[in-house]
Image: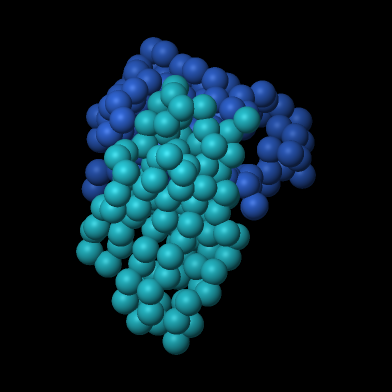
Chain colours: A cyan, B blue
Amino acid sequence: GQNIDQPTEMTATEGAIVQINCTYQTSGFNGLFWYQQHAGEAPTFLSYNVLDGLEEKGRFSSFLSRSKGYSYLLLKELQMKDSASYLCAVMDSNYQLIWGAGTKLIIKP
Amino acid sequence: IAGITQAPTSQILAAGRRMTLRCTQDMRHNAMYWYRQDLGLGLRLIHYSNTAGTTGKGEVPDGYSVSRANTDDFPLTLASAVPSQTSVYFCASSDQPGQITDTQYFGPGTRLTVL
């Protein structure tokens, strides 16, 4: 079967750094995506990894290890507006996205 | 403003009724998708269309149907709604289905309650 695991909820402090992990087992791999979803809103694209290593985009970075079936999203200099759910999704061999349940990130002052 | 619109925003529906959720995009994207999002579960693909005139089944297609008569519109129909179809429904689109660089963009969602 296909499976993507993320922690259900995490808490962090404003100004700090947080790492959200994602592990996956899917039928094929064509890339891993991270999306942000604020409560009551649509998911919005954050980042994409297809090769091993770190992709940096401002305060957000995403890492991929294909051999370990593992990715993380790193958020630096946390702001209150970063309070949201973060969704990990893998593009499988059919080029369809398989989604994790999401990690709810709570930022405290 | 370019993007995806969905209608209605929310709806309460009696079980057994027929309902069509509307989705329109103005980005001229080739592919469109319908997902449902339930608490504690990831987004699940209901149906998709890689290009106008074609559709395919996703992970949870039973009880739903779609059509893609043109590039912009992708309505989702529940022929006879049941309470288990209570969910938030998201429409999405992408420009390059079947490419590893393809990125999906989402509409604002429709919150559907079936009683």
Where residue A86 appears, x then y in whole percent? Answer: 46, 57
The residue under the point 32% across, 71% down is A76
Q: Quadrant of residue B17?
A: top right
Choose between A82 and A16: the one closer to the eye: A16
Q: Nearer the viewer, residue B26 or A106?
A: A106
Instruction: Pinpoint residue B45: horizontal percent, then vertical percent.
Output: 53, 32
**At x 30% / y 26%, what residue is drawn?**
B99
| Residue A48 screen position, x and y as percent | 32, 45
Is residue A46 in view from this perspective? no
Image quarter hosting the C terminus of chain B: top right
Q: Is residue A53 left or right of residue B8?
A: left
* Side of B68 relative to B2 (left or right): right
Q: Residue furthest top?
A: B53
Compare residues A102 and A71 and report the one nearer the observer: A71
Which percent across, then down, holds residue A4? 55, 43
Observer-nearest of A54 and B23: A54
**Along the horizontal axis of the image, is A101 left or right of A93?**
right
Numbered-mark total: 0
As drawn, the residue found furthest toward the front would be A67
Q: Residue at x 30, y 62 (%)?
A: A60
Q: In the rendered view, would you say A105 is above or below B32?
A: below
Q: In the rendered view, tell whether residue B95 sits above or below residue A70.
A: above
- Pick out the residue farthest to the bottom: A109
Observer able to see residue A31: yes
**Residue at the spot 53% in from the left edge and 74% down from the top edge:** A11
